[in-house]
Amino acid sequence: MSGIEKYRALVERSPSVRNLLAAEFNQDWDLDHPDVESVYASTIDQLEGRERDVYSEEAKLLQQELGEDDSVKGYMRYVGTGLSPMLDLGMTPKQWLDALVARLERG
């Protein structure tokens, strides 16, 4: 399976996280939000119950399938996100994904 096919399959299995990356963190997300934390506060922190579980399960799937920085970066590029973990958070792509999973698990 090529990288593109792998990313396409992962997008199908992680529609909520894809939406977070592609819609909430669109190419000009920073015009609507001062920082990443404010996006998280208006999206992730508002999730409850089953909806939060779905996001968490999807993020864990990505964490399992995208085990290194290049593959996380490739997935992010594939979904067309405007979020850059290094520029926006000072994290590698893998660190960002691990932090996303941790935040979702905190509930």
Image (spheres, helix red, strand yellow):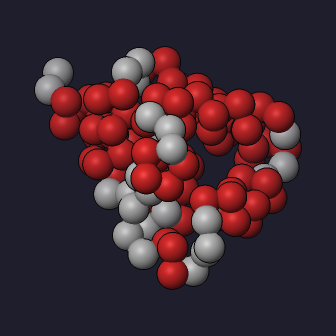
Q: Residue at x 49, y 18 (%)?
A: 64
Q: Is residue 16 above or below residue 53?
A: below
Q: Is residue 82 above or below residue 89?
A: below
Whole-percent x and y of residue 59? 57, 34
Based on the displayed image, in which of its 4 quarters is residue 40 positioned? bottom right
Question: Considering the image in quadrants, where does the C terminus appear?
Answer: top right
Residue 75 position within the rendered picture, expressed as x and y whole percent measured from the top left: 33, 39
Q: Is 88 positioned to the left or the right of 68 in the image? A: right
The image position of residue 39, as x and y in percent, is 65, 64
- Whole-percent x and y of residue 45? 79, 54
Q: Which quadrant of the view contains residue 105?
A: top right
Q: Residue at x 80, y 58 (%)?
A: 46
Name which residue lies at 49% across and 63% down: 25
Residue shown at the point (34%, 52%) measured from the top left: 79
Q: How many marks?
A: 0
Q: Nearer the viewer, residue 76 or 90?
A: 90
Q: Where on the picture, by quarter, is residue 82? A: bottom left
Residue lying at the far bottom of the rendered structure: 31
Q: Quadrant of the N terminus?
A: top left
Query: Is residue 106 found left or right of 78 in the rendered image?
Result: right
Residue 74 shows in this picture: yes
Can residue 15 be seen by looking at this rendering?
no
